[in-house]
Image (cartoon, rainbow, N blue to C red):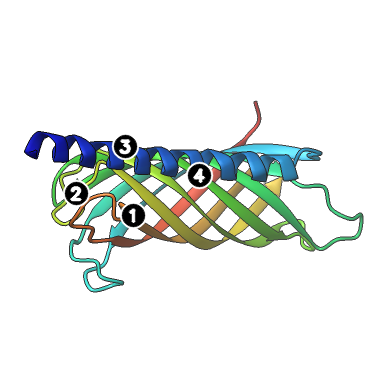
């Protein structure tokens, strides 16, 4: 009976993980279809660091990371005199855990971004979204290797000229395993990121 129960639990966990992965890709497909008539696209690399805060939304561990994010932005066409634009972001993040131990987290994110464009040089923006992560981090209280994440952020896009654009942003970043496995202590962090646009 113990073996059957163990196999049953394993099947349930696999189904839950597959649902998470399917949901992520479904959200990506829906978002990308809404931006099918794209007017422009950008590639960006963001680098920075983050830290979780004990007591913030149930966080019990102070985890510090170095962050590297590869980002593709698809910009939705806007009205000719519009003062803002909407875009869809697809990201592949790599979070290197530097304290209190060494490990990594990586996965995919999908975000929606709103940017005010009435000034050519300085353009504030906000973003919100989420995704999934795989990690080898053995963080006490966060027991699953596959975890969900969501976040929101604000930033400034600085356009020095048409060929050189960079951004400064801060994000709230939540990580938990979606109750796939117990215990499920969350990690709630803030991140500061600097991004550089480039053309392919």
| Residue at the disc numbered 1 | 178
* Residue 130 position in % (x across, y down): 48, 52
**Sooner in the amino-acid sequence: mark 3 or mark 4:** 3
Cα distance between the residues tagged 4 and 2:
21 Å
Cα distance between the residues tagged 3 and 2:
15 Å
In front of the other: 178 or 155: 178
**Sooner in the amino-acid sequence: mark 4 or mark 1:** 4
**Sooner in the amino-acid sequence: mark 4 or mark 2:** 4
**Sooner in the amino-acid sequence: mark 2 or mark 1:** 2
Cα distance between the residues tagged 3 and 4:
14 Å
Cα distance between the residues tagged 1 and 3:
13 Å
**Sooner in the amino-acid sequence: mark 1 or mark 3:** 3
Figure check: 158 above or below 19: below
Labels 3 & 4 near each other (Cβ < 8 A): no
| Residue at the disc numbered 4 | 23
Mark 1: few/some/many CA within 10 Å (<14, 14-19, 20+): some
Count of numbered labels shown in the rendering: 4
* Residue 100 position in % (x across, y down): 14, 52
**Residue at 31% across, 37% down:** 14
Mark 3: few/some/many CA within 10 Å (<14, 14-19, 20+): few
Res 200 quadrant in image: top right
In front of the other: 171 or 24: 24
Instruction: Report the mark closest to the observer, 3 or 2.
Output: 3
Q: Is residue 70 left or right of residue 49?
A: right
- Secondary structure at badge 1 equals loop
- Secondary structure at badge 4 equals helix
| Residue at the disc numbered 2 | 143
Labels 3 & 2 near each other (Cβ < 8 A): no
* Residue 40 position in % (x across, y down): 76, 39
| Residue at the disc numbered 3 | 14
């Amino acid at each position: 009976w113990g073996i059957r129960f163990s196999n049953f639990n394993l099947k349930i966990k696999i189904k839950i993980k597959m649902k998470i992965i399917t949901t992520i890709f479904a959200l990506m497909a829906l978002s990308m279809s809404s931006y099918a008539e794209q007017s422009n696209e950008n590639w960006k690399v963001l680098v920075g660091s983050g830290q979780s805060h004990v007591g913030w939304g149930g966080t019990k561990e102070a985890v510090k990371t170095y962050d590297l994010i590869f980002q593709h932005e698809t910009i939705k066409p806007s009205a000719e005199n519009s003062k803002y634009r909407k875009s869809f972001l697809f990201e592949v993040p790599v979070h290197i855990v530097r304290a209190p131990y060494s490990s990594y987290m990586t996965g995919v994110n999908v975000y929606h971004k709103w940017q005010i464009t009435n000034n050519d040089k300085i353009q504030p923006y906000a973003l919100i979204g989420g995704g999934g992560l795989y990690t080898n981090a053995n963080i006490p209280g966060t027991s699953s290797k596959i975890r969900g994440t969501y976040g929101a952020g604000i930033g400034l896009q600085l356009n020095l000229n048409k060929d050189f654009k960079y951004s400064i942003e801060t994000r709230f970043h939540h990580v938990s395993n979606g109750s796939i496995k117990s215990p499920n202590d969350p990690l709630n962090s803030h991140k500061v990121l600097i991004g550089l646009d480039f053309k392919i």
